[in-house]
Image (cartoon, rainbow, N blue to C red):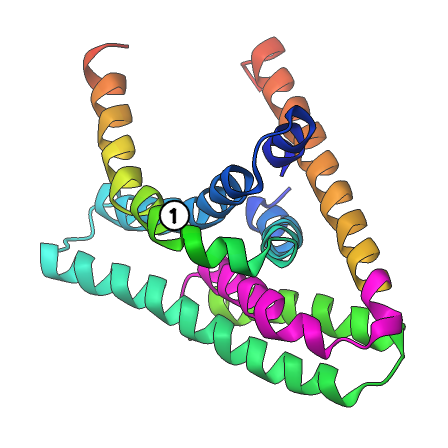
Amino acid sequence: MAVVVLLKELGASRRLATLIEGESLLNDGTAMVVFLVLLDIVKGIHLTPMDIAVRFIRLAFGGAVLGILAGIIASQILRRIHNNFVLEVNTTIFTAYLVFFVAEVTPVHVSGIIALVALGLYMTKSGKTRISAQSEHAVHHVWSYIGFIAETIIFILSGLIMGERAIMPEL
Amino acid sequence: MDPHLLLMIFIPALIFESAFNSDWHIFKVEFGQVLVMAGPMLLVCTVLSALMMTYIL
């Protein structure tokens, strides 16, 4: 997101900005899947190339299917809500966290990040038009704020952790 | 602090916000390139980083 803001300020085309943003989104998902598969190999769990391929396809495509299903349900819920921005904002936040929880923690076990990307893209494609006109701005402002605060806290925390390791490596 | 807790709190906010704010019509045009870069090219990148960490650093 930080890169995209910079690109917009520098006057790059929207196509380039979307390309980089989309790549960074899917990149997170595939990197996480690759990391989990490699972690299993490092732990000494024996995996044949077939196992790895099956696991990769299950995590990636299962995630996409889960995200799109959740998107369909969420846009049906949004369609039934009229001009109540609290409920509409709540539906989007609740769906995002529920999808990640179902994908990562429950026995469904698919890639949560890819599910979120699929959900987010489905919501831009079909869900946005189901949000009532009066609430659309509210939904966008709340999500911009959530994104901003999450990004800020992540960078502060990673700075603190890295600083701590650099200054006091014995801890 | 449990690292999984951090993941559970921040990942949905960051990823969904980013996907929700993108433009679907432009994204659709770029989707092929995005898939190539996020899939095979990511694997190439992983292998190259691993090679660098083992043989150069």
A68 on left or right of A32:
right
Residue at the spot x=55%, y=60% of the render?
B24
Q: Is residue A5 above or below residue A77?
A: above
Observer able to see residue A109 = no
The residue nearer to you, when weighing A140 against A43, is A140
In this rendering, position of residue A167 left or right of residue B36: right
Residue sitting nearer the eye, A21 or B8 = A21
Residue A113: within the magenta?
Answer: yes
Quadrant of the frame with the C terminus of chain A: top right
Q: Is residue B19 above or below residue A151?
A: below
Tell me which amino acid carries mark 1: Val
Q: In the rendering, at what x and y percent does residue A105 appear? A: 50, 66
- When asked about the image quadrant of residue A136, the answer is bottom right
The question of residue A49 being in magenta is answered with: no
Quarter of the image for the N terminus of chain A: give it: top right
Q: Which residues are magenta?
A: A110-137
- Secondary structure found at label 1: helix
- List x then y, in percent, for residue A108: 42, 75
Q: Is residue A6 visible?
A: yes
Q: Is residue A37 above or below residue A12?
A: below
Q: Tell me the residue at 64%/41% (across/down).
A: B1
Instruction: Answer left or right for A145 relative to A154.
Output: right
Where in the figure is residue A50, as x and y percent of width and height? Answer: 11, 61
